[in-house]
Amino acid sequence: MGLGPSKDFEDDRDRVLLAGKPDYDRCNNRITTSKYTLLSFIPIAVLEQFRRFANLYFLGVGGIMALGTYTTVFQSAISPWTTLGPLAAVISFSLLIEGSADRKRHISDEQTNNAPCVILRRSDEMAEDPDADREDSILNGKDVIVSLDKQYFQTSNNRTPETPAPRSGGTSVKIAFQQVRRMDIRQGHLVLIKNREMVPADMIILASSGDNGSAYIETSSIDGETNLKLRTSPDLPRKVQRFLRGAAPPLETFEEEDEEDEPGKIETLEQATKRVTRFSTLAYPDGISALENPNYGGEAASLGGSAKRSFFSAGLDSVRGFVTESIRSPSNLRMSEREDDKNNYVATLTSEPPNPHVNTFSGKLTLPPVEREGPCFDISLGAENILLRGAVLRNTEWAIG
């Protein structure tokens, strides 16, 4: 989910975003590195030139000589243009160089802001938007059909069937890949980036083609380091997932120190799109933030820290309560009947306000419950979960954030 700059009055507040819901109340993703416009170039650039002591000194000397030449205060034997003429030539040359450099910045900004990128969007919304351009290079331009009778934590390599047989009259949604300009990305958009592409905006990685949703990035344009950095997507603890899928004993028998590594999960782009859609506003456009769920336990996972460890230690009691109730229910992998989008909750990102630190990040991702009366899941986010704008995706086929 893109994390762009917020308005000034929000700079000191935590930012709250709904997954997949663009926030048009905040600014867009346009960047501006140029210093001047056509109207402001002359006054600002000239003022900058006279901030140099040498230019200011010769201007003062030339002014005194002009006073002696054109007034009767005193007499000057030297014309002021012997000083002001060379000064004007030097300043004009400096303005020419400054204008040329700023023009290149304008061109670079224009190329960057208009560079194409891909976002996930509902197919029916694209059909109603005459300006929407479908990205035909992804999945041959086909829509991804997402069944809403399945849950966001289920993937195709489950040890048990992905879900029970869908009910008659089950709902589904079609997700398409839309090409947009980079400057049109809004906070909350779900963005798809491909290998060797620049990350168009700060985003939390939610899925990738790597093991367990991991991805490699190069940050040489940010901090000068050429070695690749590993970034991972936030996820429920593996043992919680295994139990929810019916492949592990109850949580009461788990010890935090006993957590073992499983073989890495690798998702296809289609599988990842389905999983991400099911907990976002792409599935439920009128869905409610998971933070507003009456069963939400509040700050179950504090900002910052390890995603898996913080969630497992801080939210274990609420998960145990949910699992104990689920053991008695044969439909523990399904939500109860959905009457309307307003009864559904979607994942919510809470992040720290904008700051200049590129090596630290604090936030949390609140996932919706997997059954009607179940708890929400807080997952702490850190620097290992964020892709910074300007980084380049490497050795990873694709990533969604």
Image: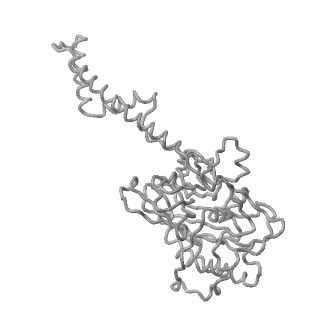
Instruction: Using the image, determine if residue 321 lies above or below residue 196.
Output: below
In front here: 281 or 84? 281
Q: Position of residue 73 (x, y in %)?
A: 22, 13
Q: Quadrant of residue 262?
A: bottom right
On the image, the x and y values in percent for residue 220 come to: 38, 55
Q: Quarter holding the C terminus?
A: bottom right
Q: Quadrant of the N terminus?
A: bottom right
Colouring style = one colour
Point 70% across, 44% down: residue: 129
Task: Name the residue: 57% across, 59% down.
Answer: 400
Viewer-proximal residue, 68 or 91?
91
Q: Quadrant of residue 224?
A: bottom left
Asked where in the image residue 63 lies, by quadrant, the reply is top left
Q: Residue at x 25, y 19 (%)?
A: 85
Q: Residue furthest bottom?
A: 253
Left or right side of 322 for 32 = left
